[in-house]
């Protein structure tokens, strides 16, 4: 593994280890505080809203700096210090507001990390897809180990104690950031504060000329469908299929486990076939996932669905990330990668609400609706994007 790459990969692994663990911990903590299910759901909605606007804004700020190291330290260290407060806050609404503050800082990490990983790839499909696949492999490894560690910690510790444990790991994540090699990159210079934060306000030409809007639309619809279905899949598995909580946790872990292999595989495939095909494969497999969930009568089809979903994510995120990296202006790369995170965040906000509403009447109808929306996203990508990337 290249020495220049290692600090970023270690940081990303630890950051996603913490974020994936906190995703469940925050829900459990809110329930301990007596919050209603509506308020627990509000937590996801508020965090998603903050990330929607925070990701491209941080990306734009990053594009305006010659070196990104200090900004990365800020975005990793600030949430790490704030995490500890989760264990002592006792008012649900304060908990949610505080969570939105942390989400504002965490929103900037992923797009800037992706920009850093592709910065010196010389804009080739092979190099860009390889670097993104390696970074995403580290992310998924962090997600998988973070969830496994959480299941172990909750056997021996309280929720508050587990929160402090994850906050400590978040502090450790700052260490490899200190060893990031600072290198200058092309700087995006915009006049005016709002234009620096949201450059699309001044120049949105690349969004339309390169067909990037279709990638973002497809991303939104895919995330809406997958987030909607998975937001209530645990209830579906336990109440309809009759699985235990432990079995549910094991089956759902198939997703991040398969992502690890998928990132590596499609990182190589993209170099030969191009990122557009990989993106469409990811969307297609996501549709199949919803169908498997819809017809499931036992754990088998649920497991197959999660197997497909893990492969789908690697195909999709590496394909979409490569398309955006190569289609966006080099001096605005982090901004456009931030918009990818925003599109996913919006889908994550809308999907669970829509899925929950439809599932009240029919789980089968909900899964089929999610499949249809994802397929619509794929159709948009097919019609409005082209295979115009040179592969090797």
Image (cartoon, rainbow, N blue to C red):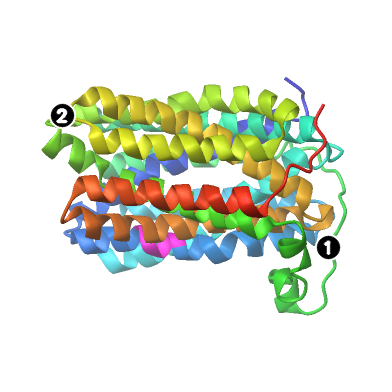
User: Residue 153 vs residue 103: left or right?
Assistant: left
- How many neighbours does mark 2 have within 10 angstroms: few (below 14), some (14-19), or many (20 or more)? some
User: Residue 84 vs residue 105: left or right?
Assistant: left
Q: Nearer the viewer, residue 112 or 265?
A: 265
Can residue 90 be seen in the rendering of this structure?
A: no
Mark 1 to mark 2 CA distance (whole Å): 52 Å
In the picture, the quarter occupied by the C terminus is top right
- Lower position in the chain sequence, tag 1 or tag 2: 1
The percent position of residue 239, horizontal first and vertical second, equals: 12, 39
Residue 1's place in the image compared with 65, above or below, is above
Tag nearer the camera, 1 or 2:
2
In the picture, the quarter occupied by the N terminus is top right
* Residue beneath the point at 28% across and 26% down: 301
- The residue at the far front in this view is 383
The residue tagged 1 is: 188
Q: Secondary structure at mark 1?
A: loop
User: Residue 284 vs residue 109: left or right?
Assistant: left
Can residue 271 be seen in the rendering of this structure?
A: yes
Quarter-of-image position of residue 290: top left
Q: Is residue 45 magenta?
A: yes
The residue tagged 2 is: 243
* Residue beneath the point at 57% across and 54% down: 380
* Residue beneath the point at 37% across and 35% down: 289
Q: Is residue 38 magenta?
A: no
The percent position of residue 226, horizontal first and vertical second, equals: 40, 45
Q: Secondary structure at mark 2?
A: loop
Q: Nearer the viewer, residue 275 or 160?
A: 275
Residue 202's place in the image compared with 61, above or below, is below
Report the magenta residues as a range: 44-48
């Amino acid at each position: 593994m290249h020495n220049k790459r290692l600090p970023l990969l270690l940081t990303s692994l630890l950051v996603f280890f913490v974020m994936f663990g906190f995703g469940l911990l925050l829900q459990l903590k809110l329930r301990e505080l007596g919050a209603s299910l509506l308020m627990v759901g509000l937590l996801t909605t508020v965090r998603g809203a903050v990330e929607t606007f925070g990701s491209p804004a941080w990306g734009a700020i990053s594009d305006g700096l010659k070196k990104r190291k200090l900004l990365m330290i800020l975005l990793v260290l600030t949430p790490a210090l704030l995490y500890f407060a989760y264990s002592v806050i006792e008012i649900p609404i304060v908990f949610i507001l505080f969570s939105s503050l942390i989400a504002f800082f965490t929103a900037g990490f992923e797009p800037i990390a992706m920009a850093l990983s592709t910065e010196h790839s010389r804009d080739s499909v092979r190099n860009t897809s390889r670097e993104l696949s390696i970074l995403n492999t580290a992310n998924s490894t962090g997600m998988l180990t973070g969830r496994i560690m959480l299941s172990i910690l909750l056997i021996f510790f309280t929720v508050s104690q587990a929160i402090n444990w994850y906050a400590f790991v978040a502090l450790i994540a700052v260490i490899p950031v200190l060893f990031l090699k600072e290198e200058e990159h092309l700087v995006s210079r915009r006049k005016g504060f709002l234009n620096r934060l949201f450059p699309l306000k001044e120049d949105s030409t690349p969004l339309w000329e390169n067909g990037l809007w279709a990638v973002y639309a497809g991303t939104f619809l895919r995330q809406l469908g997958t987030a909607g279905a998975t937001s209530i899949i645990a209830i579906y598995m336990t109440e309809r299929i009759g699985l235990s909580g432990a079995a549910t946790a094991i089956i759902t872990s198939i997703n991040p486990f398969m992502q690890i292999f998928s990132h590596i595989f499609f990182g190589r495939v993209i170099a030969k076939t191009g990122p557009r095909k990989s993106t469409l494969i990811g969307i297609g497999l996501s549709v199949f996932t919803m169908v498997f969930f819809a017809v499931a009568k036992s754990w088998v089809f649920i497991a197959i669905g999660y197997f497909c979903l893990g492969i789908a994510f690697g195909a999709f995120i590496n394909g979409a990330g490569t398309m955006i990296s190569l289609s966006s202006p080099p001096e605005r790369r982090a901004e456009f990668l931030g918009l990818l995170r925003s599109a996913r965040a919006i889908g994550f906000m809308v999907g669970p609400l829509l899925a929950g509403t439809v599932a009240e009447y029919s789980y089968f109808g909900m899964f089929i609706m999610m499949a249809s929306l994802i397929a619509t996203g794929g159709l948009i990508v097919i019609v409005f994007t082209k295979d115009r990337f040179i592969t090797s």
